[in-house]
Amino acid sequence: MEEARKMDKQAIRTRYLGIRNGLSYSEREQKSREIWKLLKEEEVFQKAQAVLVYMDYRSEVMTTGLVEELLSEGEKKVYAPKVDGMNILFYEITSMEDLQPGYQGIREPVEKEERLYDSKMAGKDGIILVPGAVFDRQRSRMGYGKGFYDRFLSKNPGLFSAALAFECQIARKIPVEPHDIKPDMIVTEKERIR
């Protein structure tokens, strides 16, 4: 039963990643900008002093332009993830030069202990942007199978989480596990799902 469930999840993940991969670069760029617009209209985003971003990889909702905007505005602290074994840690970045190729070629911040995100010190004034392969209308999220974001969110329960997804990544219902953590909100180019 457990093996069949894993195979079902992998088949669903593969199917939706295939759909997402079918979007052209220009489609992804346009839809990503629409997602940023809806995200930035949210009060929780406007009030956030810290934004924990993911650095886009392959066909994910693009975040590079959003990160560049946030850095140039200089009003919020921006943190990017770095893989550390089976966990992710977030480090503050002040420019795109603070990033270098890391885990699977994904841009990661240069590790500096004094720039490490600490939820106890940061308070509850932050928001984390979460990637994923497929989501549903109950806000369930299926990532890429490593559990990085589920583990991070379980250790930072007060941090508001917003998953960024293209509308084509929203399924009717996806299987979930007890350790899966739902984002507080999913933002697509068409809507916000709460």
Image (tube, rainbow, N blue to C red):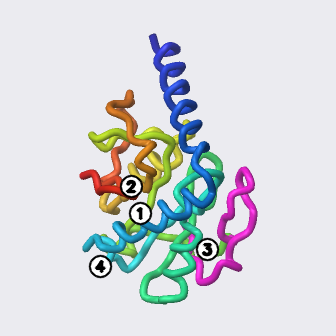
**Amino acid type at image mark 3:** Glu
Tell whether label 1 touches label 3 (CB within 8 Å). no
Check disc 3 and report the residue beneath it. Answer: 113
Res 121 quadrant in image: bottom left
At a point 61% along the width and 44% down the height, the residue shown is: 21
Check disc 1 and report the residue beneath it. Answer: 35
At a point 56% along the width and 55% down the height, the residue shown is: 88
Task: State the image coordinates of residue 165 (x, y, percent, origin top left).
Answer: 44, 52
Check disc 4 and report the residue beneath it. Answer: 47
* Residue neighbourhood size for the residue with mark 1, other residues' Cα within 10 Å, grouped as few (<14), some (14–19), many (≥20): many
Looking at the rendered structure, the secondary structure element under dot 4 is helix
Tell whether label 1 touches label 4 (CB within 8 Å). no
- Tag in front: 4 or 1: 1
57, 105: nearer the viewer: 57
Looking at the rendered structure, the secondary structure element under dot 2 is loop
Tell whether label 4 touches label 2 (CB within 8 Å). no
190, 108: nearer the viewer: 190
Tell whether label 2 touches label 1 (CB within 8 Å). yes
| Disc 2/disc 3 C-alpha distance (Å) | 34 Å
| Disc 3/disc 4 C-alpha distance (Å) | 26 Å
Tell whether label 4 touches label 3 (CB within 8 Å). no
* Residue neighbourhood size for the residue with mark 4, other residues' Cα within 10 Å, grouped as few (<14), some (14–19), many (≥20): few
* Residue neighbourhood size for the residue with mark 2, other residues' Cα within 10 Å, grouped as few (<14), some (14–19), many (≥20): many
Which region is colored magenta? 90-110
| 98 is within the stretch colored magenta | yes
Looking at the rendered structure, the secondary structure element under dot 1 is helix
Q: Which of marks 4 and 1 is nearer the N terminus?
A: 1
At a point 74% along the width and 68% down the height, the residue shown is: 100
- Tag in front: 2 or 3: 2
